[in-house]
Amino acid sequence: MVSPLEPKKKRGRIAAFLLAIDAWLDSTLYEVGFKAREFWEAATVFFRRFRVKGWRRGIIEILSEGFTLGTGGAVVMLALAMPAFQETGGDWRAQDDFAVTFLDRYGNEIGQRGLIQRDSVPVDQMPDHVIKAVLATEDRRFFEHYGIDVLGLIRAMTENVRANSVVQGGSSITQQLAKNLFLSNERTLERKIKEAFLALWLEANLSKKEILQLYLDRSYMGGGTFGIEAAADFYFGKSVRDLTLAEAAMIAGLFKAPSKYAPHVNLPAARARANVVLSNLVDSNFMTEGQVLQARMHPADVVDRGDRKSPDYYLDWAFEEVRKIAARSRQHSLVAHTAFDPNLQQAAEESLEFHLRQYGKEYHASQGAIVVIETNGAVRAIVGGRDYGASQFNRATKALRQPGSSFKVYVYATAVEHGFTPDTIVSGAPISWGGWHPGNYNGASAGRMTLTTALVKSINTVPVRLAKDNLGIKPIKELAEAMGVESTLESHKTMVLGTSGMTVMDQATGYSVFPQDGMVGTRHGVTQLVTHTGEVIYDFAKDAPPPHRVLSEQAVSYMNTMLVQVPVIGTARRAALPGIVSGGKTGTSQSYRDAWYVGFTGNYTAAVWIGNDDYSPTRNMTGGSLPAMVWQRLMAYAHQNIDLKPIPGIAQPFVDTATAAKAEEAAKAAAQAEADREAAERPPVLSSRTTQLLRLMNRQFLSAPALRPEAEPETVSAL
């Protein structure tokens, strides 16, 4: 039998156990707190020995703040350095082992790439005066600094301020090598930061001798040559080992601006620059005035190379094509027949330079790029910038710039493939898409209109509405890529107004589909690759994949019918060719940073971009202004004395003046009708109350009695 007192005993034991735990916790916490207070008091007493008072305390505070700022600065420096060091991930030491001689479409040699550096001559085997001439001009303290010459930078800034112009550069040889090996020539803060970190990286990983060797072997020296040995052979017909002091001074003067001081182009300028190099030798105490006197009195003469100018931007692009084509070939010494046309190249360069000199300051535009493609897909000319010597960065094939409204052709091409026609009525009213409210140029409103009018007037809300309500982003992106756009397009709704970066080559390739009747896959620069013994390695006509269709014949006809009206009654009237039918589209990016005109005839397609390397805005420059003018001057020359081909869907290549006049009248009538409609829909300016008062005042004036006429003054007879 269980005792009734048993549960009470169990509860008593549990309570006692819990009280014991509570007492243990209290005592333990007390002991821990007591010990902690003892430790803190002991630590405080100990550290009081190191307390500094008086003037020493100020020094300690400064050092403490310095360590704090230094730690933060180190973190920031590391964050800035990481992108620069990522550039060193590849095999940057390796030089291409291809040696390619390029010929133009007529079989004339236009340049070389690959092993154009010739065989590298070790620094130890170069004459002493060659090395001294380079160091005296480019980096006098090369063997004293650690990649960045602070004293040299201060000296250069002082001399530039004193001369009120840029007479000396502050970049060290190591910085210049870092730019040549890893970076482009774009003048941006990001590039300068990377250049500084890469210079330090090179100094940490290479000896001074290796840095100097790479600099002398990799620098562009004008005339399509890279490296001092190739330059000595090109300009003087000898090895760098045999250069005289006068010749060495002329060579050393090329590093600053090879195109400007190339002796085969401008010998007087080259000699003047060589004289500056000789003065640098004296100023840096590398030589005496007596030692350089003979070189001053007898300047160097160069081998007669004529006035041939190397199309370097085209050669750089064609060389990449050769490397892709011949990647698996065992033959690396090749001759490349290209589609290059020297006459069109000269016309393109002249048109760009003419207009930038004439209007560049007015529009705040300093750079441009052009690509010309014949209707058979042959790339005839590439202008990658104004001066290859100043910047080897190819803006035609490498620079990603926003195409603006020139991208709309891909939207409209997708639309006509989905059943739209040039006469389809669409709404240009304001539209909102996920918080995005695109507007038209200058904030103008638009009502209902045909697809043709929307394209010709470059209405922004129409392609946005087409993409949102009818097409979607994916089909537009896929068609643009199928038409030859190789740059990565963002799948964002703003893409329809040209916010994704594209190259000039992309645009020329994409637009060339319209005169090629919807076919793609014909673009090429290399027509044939052969060895020096005549063995054919590659023939575009036989080995290239066959072209394929991306646009139906009906879609091409619709697009061309609309695009040929842009130079007549649209935004590109300055691009209209006299007597020749052409089509195209203008483009202007956000904040006027990029201006485009891409157009075509039955014979050629040309894409023109104008802007600034640093992405600074132009002064309200649109695609219908300077780019259209550059395009018109170039294409007017290109179509001289050739058989004009019709644009697919357009009856003839010649402009029918009667039809053009009717189109002009129709455009004026449409503009007047639009103005009348807007006037009819315009809200009243005055309130109804004010209008009633004015009408009442008018009635009172009309009903008021006439005033008595004043007495006429007596006439005074003339004496």
Image (spheres, rainbow, N blue to C red):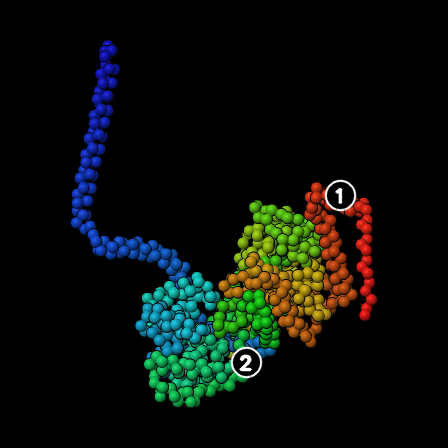
Q: Residue at x 66, y 66 (%)?
A: 574
Amino acid marked by disc 1: Leu
Q: Residue at x 63, y 68 (%)?
A: 629
Q: Position of residue 692 (x, y in %)?
A: 73, 42
Q: Nearer the viewer, mark 1 or mark 2?
A: 1
Residue furthest out toward the top: 1
Q: Which of the 4 image quadrants contains residue 344?
A: bottom right
Q: Label 2's element?
A: loop
**CB of mark 1 within 8 Å of CB of mark 2?**
no
Q: Residue at x 52, y 73 (%)?
A: 387
Q: Position of residue 523 (x, y in %)?
A: 59, 66
Q: Residues within 10 Å of mark 2 (few under 14, many from 20)?
A: few
Q: Residue at x 70, y 56 (%)?
A: 452
Amino acid marked by disc 2: Arg
Q: Which mark is residue 650?
A: none
Indicate the quadrant containing the N terminus: top left, top right, bottom left or bottom right. top left
Q: Which of the 4 image quadrants contains residue 41?
A: top left
Question: Disc 2 designates what residue?
Answer: 308
Relative to 117, residue 397 above or below: above
Relative to 150, residue 687 above or below: above
Question: Disc 1 designates what residue?
Answer: 696
Q: Earlier in the sequence, mark 1 or mark 2?
A: 2
Indicate the quadrant containing the C terminus: top left, top right, bottom left or bottom right. bottom right
Residue 636 or 534: which is nearer the viewer?
A: 636
Whole-number angstrom distance, CA of label 1 to CA of label 2: 84 Å
Q: Residues within 10 Å of mark 1 (few under 14, many from 20)?
A: few
Q: Is residue 596 left or right of residue 687?
A: left
- Label total for image: 2
Whether residue 382 is visible, yes or no, is no
Q: Position of residue 37 (x, y in %)?
A: 20, 38
Q: Label 1's element?
A: helix
Whether residue 65 is visible, yes or no, is yes
